[in-house]
Structure formats: C-alpha cells, structure tokens
Image: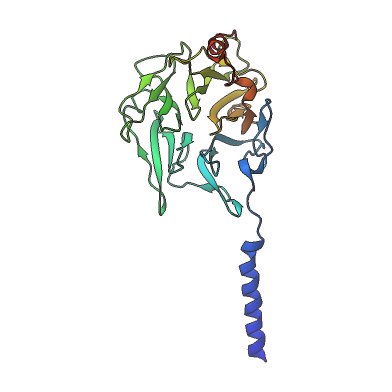
Amino acid sequence: MKHTKKKLFWFVAFLGVSTIGLCAEPFAKGPYLGQTPPGPIAQVFAPGLISDTRPHQGEAWANFSADGNTFCFSQLGYVYITENTDQGWTVPKRIRSIPYRTTYCCLSPDTNSIYFMYGKSYSPCRCQRTSDGWSTYQEIGPPLSSPARELGISLAANNNIYFGSKRKGEIRCRIWVAPFVDNTWPRAVHISLNHQAADPGIAPDESFMVFTAINLPGSYGQRDLYLTLRLPDGTWSKPRNLGPRINSAYFEFSPRISSDKKYLFFTRSNGWWENSSRDTSDIYWVELKEYLPDPNDSSLIGRKKVYGNEKQ
C-alpha cells in the first residue's frame, strides 16, 4: 500500500511539472509583440513589457528583423533579444557575449549578426549567431572604424552600412555609407547633407533616412530627429525636422525603421541621466505615413525636391 501511494505521489508530481510549460503564458503574442499600432503621434512602445517608464531605467535601439519575428534592443547598457515562436514571443534574453555599455546596437537583416559600437572611440563591432549561441564579438576595423569617434550604425536590406563619424578632423559629425561588396565593406563614402548628423536609421531600401542632430536652429529640444529622402539622382534632400509629434523638449535618438517602412522606432530621454530624480529613456514608435511623400503620386520627383527644401 505504501509503495502504491509513493508511486502515485511521484506520478502526480511529474504531471504537475510537465504541465507548467503547457500552461505558462508566452511573453507576448502577435505582430510587434502584440502592440496596437500607433498613429502619427509618437507613443511609448510596449510599456511595462519592453519600455520601463519608471525613473532610472533606459531602453534604446529597437530593431525588428525583416520578417518581424526577431526583436533586439538595449536596456541599461545590455543587449537583449526576443523571438516569435509558434507559442508566442520568448522572454527577452541578454546576449552575454556583447559587453556592458555598448551603444547603437543593430540587428542584421537575416538576424544572424548584431552590430554595435564599443570602446573609447565607439569602434564598430559584430557578434554572430552560431549553433551554440552568440559568438565572441570582434571589431570590424577600417574603413568602418577610424581614430575618430563613430556615432551610430544602421544596416540596409542589402547590408550596406550607414554610420556617423567625426573622421578627417571634422568638428561636426557627418553620415557615411559603406557599400557591401564581396561579403565585406571595402570603402566608406561621405553623404553630403550640409548638415550636422549622427546616429542614422536607414530605410531597408535606402529610400530615406532618419538621423539625430544636436541644437540646430528651429529644433524642439537638445537632440531632434530629422528625415532626408534619397532623390532620383542619388543625392539626398535637405533634412527636415520631423516636428513636435515626434520631437520634444528632451532628447530623441536611436532611430530605426521597420522593414515595411510603416513605423519609426526611436528613444526619448527626459534627461539622459542628468535628472537624478526622474530620468528615464523609453522606446517610442510612430506611423510614418504622414511624414513621407505618396509614392503613387505622378509628380513625385518634383514633390521630392520641394519637400526636401521646405523651411524648418
């Protein structure tokens, strides 16, 4: 009798343990972690789930993969990743091979690499997905790195890399692009914007770009987001401030554009750790439709030029 009771006890215990995984709710369900898409006014992305709005918290550099099933972001100096499975989104997991206090993390289009800046000069680095997890990070080296400080990194769908840099002795930061050729980046080319620019977020098809600029005339805060369009001749339109529905009196930075070009993700900080009582940095997202010209407009080429030279 005692032996039978013992067997029954362990059977019940085993049944309870085995059903925990079946009954546990996933971290989130649905596209964009189940969040209701925003309109033209920026909203906090996934509050309480990804963005921690409490004081002394900070999230930035929100990246969705091309298929929308992988999400990578930074939180308090560490990089995390979550993936959408048949059961829903996994709990965000810290990538331990990426060191503390990295910046500008960026997920590759195929989700097999994560790029970021690290070190005193913010050198571009990369870690890669392996069968055993994520590899030890490695510096990418020239021409992406230089003795100057690099400020921002973003990948297009074709793996062209856009980044900010103060190279060649310039006081102001400017945007550069390194074309991806034969599985490497043999050169970096300066993008002429006649505009201070850093921290670029490139559209997947390179049709437009959002970047951060500091203390420009007509800006809404210390760091605002600006948009520039790629024109038919390959040049870029005059940068345009994205306005008060996106920018604020605080700091806006880390722009990232969704693969369908519908949404802009960015970070807003109310003090960037300068306000000791309530500083916080949260990820926001906004629908881009009202901020871009209509691609079906037959006068698009002319409108692009006018749009790019609007007064700020």
Quadrant of the image containing the C terminus: top right
20 vs 60: above or below: below
Residue 281 appears in the rendering: no
Residue 244, image x, y percentages: 66, 19
Quadrant of the image containing the N terminus: bottom right
Residue 249, image x, y percentages: 65, 20
Residue 6 appears in the rendering: yes
Question: Would residue 181 be found to the left or right of residue 304 on screen?
Answer: left
Q: Which residue shows up at 62% across the image and 42% down it? A: 31
Question: Would residue 288 be found to the left or right of residue 168 on screen?
Answer: right
Furthest residue in direction bottom, as rendered = 1
Task: Identify the image quadrant of residue 33.
Answer: top right
Q: Which residue shows up at 66% across the image and 76% down it? A: 12
Q: Which residue shows up at 43% across the image and 16% down it? A: 234
Q: Which residue shows up at 51% across the image and 41% down it? A: 78
In the image, 280 versus 182, the foreground residue is 182
Residue 296, image x, y percentages: 59, 21
Question: Would residue 202 be found to the left or right of residue 128 on screen?
Answer: right
309 vs 43: above or below: above
In the image, 53 versus 183, the foreground residue is 183
